[in-house]
Image: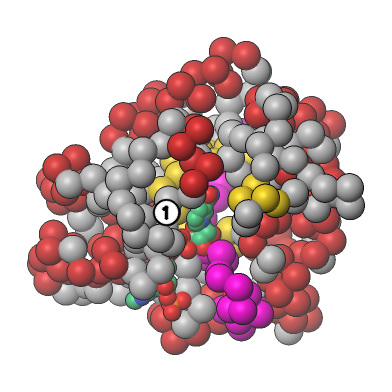
Amino acid sequence: MSTESALTIKLKLNNGIEAPAIALGTYNSEGLQPKVKDAVKAAVKGGYRHIDTAWIYGTETYIGEALAELFAEGVVKREDLFITTKVWPTHWNDPSKSIDESLKRLGIDYLDLVLQHWPLTFKVDADGNPLMNDGQFVPDDGDYLDTWKKLIALYKKDNKKIRSIGVSNYTIPYLERLLKETDIVPVVNQVELHPSLPQVDLVKFSKDHGILTEAFSPLGSRGAPLLKLPIVETLAKKYDASPAEILINYHVKSGRLAAPRSINTERLAKGFNSVPLTADDLKSLDQEGIDHPKRYVNMGFAKSVGYENWSEDKP
Ligand code: NDP
């Protein structure tokens, strides 16, 4: 088995900046968020250089604590890391407020990448917090593309504070409208992507327009069900690699970013080895999801973006 780490692989964004292809995912369910502090410390010590978070995850403060300790211990410097956060649709009309809150919680003074989390707008309550009704976000009647336009203005004003901007959960029609009506091409579109949901048309469309695709839920989300997919197990045997390494190399060997999540510090310390998957291997992994598509992250509000719910499984 190769012992070369895949964590050192970098991809060039359309603005010339390089991003480590593998990001540490930091979404965690209620109660588990504090564990993200130790996860970040273990991951960075194990070689991860890209952290993926979001205003809505409630983990930025714990990441900030980890970063402060890593910087103080001299493990890495700020400029060694690539940090991504996202603007939730409740901040659709004022992304700068969201970005400033994220920076404060993270304890840093610039972000490498800011993503519009969803092409949606949600209402806020009188205190500026997300307005909820029966546990659901309440749609606002604003235009989701205004958020992207405001992110462009912030990026053009100060690209040292926000080094790159991108989107998340955009489908082809949404990207088409964005490309037609605005003058900055997102560096990244972060979407659910794995062998059960290869999204080949979206990946090709994005590539043709200079947008890198970033895979979220690359292991199939909670419990990592995709580790048991027969094609993944077969390739793991063929290359004497772990199933998780196959699932991550599926993206990085295709020129995509991936954001696997873990709070297991032993796994994080090990990282992922590079696996020399061939073009045929990558095709067989795509074919799995072309034949048997399955989405693992089923957000109720995603339907309004044209998402189909292919699975009853909850993230
Ligand atoms: P993943 O597909 O990364 O799966 C996470 C699960 O896999 C956890 O239960 C984790 O458990 C387990 N796991 C990780 N490594 C292994 C391993 N080697 N063997 C066995 N189990 C393993 O899930 P997510 O849905 O969290 O997606 C990853 C990230 O993508 C998120 O954290 C977030 O940063 C981003 N994301 C973005 C979204 C968006 O809308 N833009 C939506 C959803 C996610 P353990 O912790 O115990 O290791």
- In the image, is 309 to the left or to the right of 213? left
State the colouring used for the structure image. Answer: secondary structure
Residue 204 position, x and y percent, is 34, 29
Task: Report if the beta carbon of the residue with label 1 is closer than 8 angstroms to ligand 1.
Answer: yes
Residue 133 position, x and y percent, is 67, 50
For the N terminus, which image quadrant? bottom left
Q: Would residue 57 be counted in the magenta stretch?
A: no
Q: Residue at x 67, y 57 (%)?
A: 56
Q: Label 1 amino acid?
A: Val
Instruction: State whether residue 5 appears in this view.
Output: no
When asked about the image quadrant of residue 245, the answer is bottom left
The outermost residue toward the bottom is 266
Q: Mark 1 — residue?
A: 297
For the C terminus, which image quadrant? bottom left
Q: Would residue 31 be counted in the magenta stretch?
A: yes
Residue 289 position, x and y percent, is 21, 46
Vertical placement of residue 32 versus 129, above or below: below
Q: The residue tagged with tag 1: helix, strand or loop?
A: loop
Q: Residue at x 56, y 70 (%)?
A: 29
